[in-house]
Amino acid sequence: MAFLLLISAGAGCVRGRGAEPDTLPETEWSLTVTNHHWLDVGIQVITDGQRARVGAVPAASAATYILPPRMVGPGRTVRLEANAIGSTARTTSEGLLVRAGQHVEWTLQSGLGQSSVAVW
């Protein structure tokens, strides 16, 4: 019986070692939102059609969020959405290719449609 346990444990170790080269390190990515709008804005990240609420950025201020790597990846695009709280004003960024470890800077203007985004 102990012999079977030893063989099972050894097989588990071999599988674990074989999987290591295929796995990628999980690294977070960051999003800084600078809000020049006169209202607070709610921020969401849209990935694969699913929305994730990130937080709210007060009027005339900035906030940085550290986000999980599961939101981004090879071949996946993300969109950012800002909703002015207490208003119907909102904007959505174009699709962005973001990789784990990168930083996204989104500057929201008082006219949300004139906002800009950069990824590095």
Image (cartoon, rainbow, N blue to C red):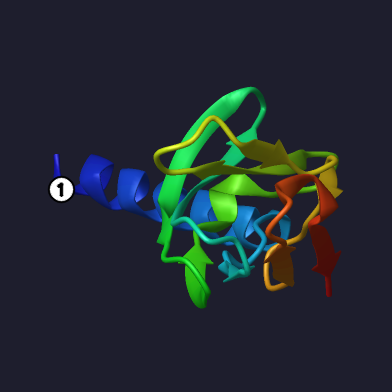
**Direction from residue 31 to residue 9 in the image, left or right:** left
- Give me the residue at 41% from left, 66% from top: 58
Quarter of the figure with the N terminus: top left
Numbered disc total: 1
Q: Which residue is mark 1?
A: 2
Q: Of residues 92 and 58, which is closer to you in this image?
A: 58
Q: Does 77 sit above or below residue 29?
A: above
Q: Does 4 sit above or below residue 18?
A: above
Q: Residue furthest left?
A: 1
Q: Residue furthest top?
A: 49
Label 1: few (<14), some (14–19) or many (≥20) C-alpha neighbours in 10 Å:
few
Q: Position of residue 63 (x, y in %)?
A: 49, 74
**Direction from residue 97 to residue 20 in the image, left or right:** left
Task: Indicate the secondary structure of the residue bearing disc 1.
Answer: helix
Q: Position of residue 73 (x, y in %)?
A: 73, 48
**Direction from residue 11 to residue 35 in the image, left or right:** right
Q: Position of residue 97 (x, y in %)?
A: 84, 51
Q: Position of residue 81 (x, y in %)?
A: 62, 41
Q: Of residues 85 and 67, which is closer to you in this image?
A: 85
Q: Amino acid at mark 1?
A: Ala
Q: Does 8 sit above or below residue 115?
A: above
Quarter of the figure with the C terminus: bottom right
